[in-house]
């Protein structure tokens, strides 16, 4: 909402909070940063203030509001806090960067985050003020450039690869990795923090506590030149167990003398990205970890030799005791045929969970507490038997407790 009406945002909605609408403000703190609407004046529309809004149905606004005041230079001054600021205004962002002597982008949100070139009317944007430390953001009332400031662009990188996360119709394409001659191995002008999203949608990010322990979520990770090999560890958050597809765009921009692999650290497997630039997986934990690698053959062989499990293993199921379902962990050092089945305490077959080939790596297989006929079995002690084609046999106990 433009202007400085000082009106409570709730006055723009009808119905009941939590049933028809919900509002949040981001206070910029490192933790517990989403503040739910509480009727206080922090939820009043002031200069540059923006909010997260969830609204059922259509939302129509017809209001007259007071324009934001101008300073002596004919500028609007938006108050800023340290850290993330959720702000709004209507003007090209390049103009504002030049006026304030900063290079930070603003981040728009349309289901996922992306860098924006303009402040558009009636839309909120995230601005990271952690390093700049501005007390106010000066916004010209007219598009007038004051002083020049060098804008750091992703195009300045020697090469870069975009990582896109797709889950159903959702896409997060804000992650980049690459190399630039002027880049630092630590936080610098290339390595930008990524805003914190509302809700439970999947998110891809570079977790860099060593760069900033308070705001450790970054969108790009641009490194100095590669000598023998380099890795860019990133994480994916997802509290759903739906399939996720990772797509690596512009792999061909990486120098031809380097091999390029993706290591799935969670599942202990890897993929040659020059042969296939897409990787699909199903999350088994909220945080899945990956490491793209680029380098010469010898350096990457050394790294890849430690990825796969060293031996066959049947891990403990979790949870245990369980109700109604449990997950069984397997380690497979090489592509192999395996049988995984559930017996009761009398040695009678209850359910065959898998019989056939499994690729090398770690696997998680679910048992929903049903037998071969699909009926739920009774509470009690059950035996999980893991047998390989080479004759290795392992048994573990699990308890179904209703």
Image (cartoon, rainbow, N blue to C red):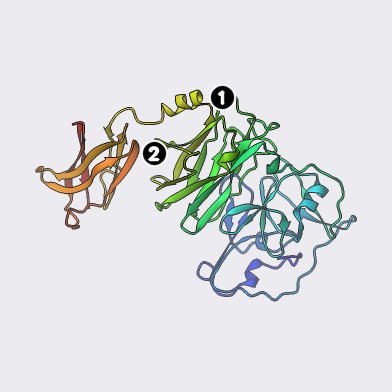
Q: Is residue 289 above or below residue 240?
A: above
Residue of label 2: 267
Which image quadrant for residue 130? top right
On the image, the x and y values in percent for residue 199 come to: 51, 56
Which tag is nearer the camera, tag 1 or tag 2?
1
The residue at the point 73 percent across, 61 percent down is: 46
User: Is residue 299 visible to us here?
Assistant: yes
Residue 355 versus residue 255: which sits nearer the camera?
Answer: 255
Is 377 left or right of 301, judged from the image as shown? left
Find numbered disc 1 in the image and state the secondary structure of the residue it sits on: loop
Q: Quadrant of the N terminus?
A: bottom right
Residue 70 versus residue 372: which sits nearer the camera?
Answer: 372
On the image, the x and y values in percent for residue 76 come to: 81, 57
Residue 139 versus residue 289: which sits nearer the camera?
Answer: 289
Which comes before the other along the chain, label 1 or label 2? 1
Residue of label 1: 228
């Amino acid at each position: 909402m433009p202007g400085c009406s000082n009106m409570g945002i709730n006055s723009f909605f009808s119905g009941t909070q939590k049933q028809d609408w919900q509002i949040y403000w981001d206070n910029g703190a490192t933790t517990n940063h989403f503040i739910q609407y509480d009727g206080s004046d922090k939820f009043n529309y002031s200069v540059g203030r923006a909010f997260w809004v969830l609204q059922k149905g259509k939302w129509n606004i017809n209001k007259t509001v007071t324009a934001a005041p101008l300073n002596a230079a004919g500028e609007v001054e938006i108050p800023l806090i340290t850290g993330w600021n959720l702000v709004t205004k209507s003007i090209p962002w390049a103009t504002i960067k030049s006026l304030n002597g900063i290079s930070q982008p603003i981040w728009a949100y349309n289901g996922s985050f992306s860098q924006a070139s303009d402040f558009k009317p009636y839309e909120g944007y995230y601005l990271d003020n952690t390093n700049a430390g501005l007390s106010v953001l000066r916004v010209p009332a007219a598009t007038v450039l004051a002083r020049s400031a060098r804008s750091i662009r992703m195009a300045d990188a020697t090469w870069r690869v975009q990582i896109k996360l797709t889950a159903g119709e959702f896409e997060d394409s804000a992650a980049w990795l690459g190399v630039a001659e002027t880049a630092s191995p630590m936080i610098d002008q290339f390595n930008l923090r990524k805003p914190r999203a509302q809700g439970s949608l999947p998110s891809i990010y570079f977790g860099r506590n060593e760069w900033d322990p308070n705001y450790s979520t970054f969108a790009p990770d641009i490194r100095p030149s590669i000598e023998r090999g380099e890795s860019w560890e990133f994480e994916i958050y997802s509290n759903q167990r739906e399939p996720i597809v990772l797509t690596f765009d512009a792999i061909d921009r990486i120098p031809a003398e380097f091999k390029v692999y993706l290591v799935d650290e969670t599942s202990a497997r890897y993929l040659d990205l020059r042969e296939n630039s897409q990787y699909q997986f199903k999350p088994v934990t909220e945080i899945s970890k990956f490491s793209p690698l680029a380098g010469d053959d010898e350096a990457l062989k050394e790294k890849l030799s430690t990825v796969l499990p060293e031996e066959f293993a049947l891990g403990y199921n979790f949870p245990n005791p369980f109700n109604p379902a449990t997950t069984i962990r397997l380690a497979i050092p090489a592509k192999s045929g395996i049988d995984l089945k559930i017996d009761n305490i009398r040695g009678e077959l209850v359910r065959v969970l898998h019989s056939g080939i499994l690729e090398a790596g770690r696997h998680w297989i679910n048992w929903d507490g049903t037998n071969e006929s699909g009926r739920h079995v009774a509470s009690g002690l059950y035996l999980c038997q893991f047998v390989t084609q080479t004759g290795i046999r392992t048994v573990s106990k699990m308890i179904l407790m209703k």
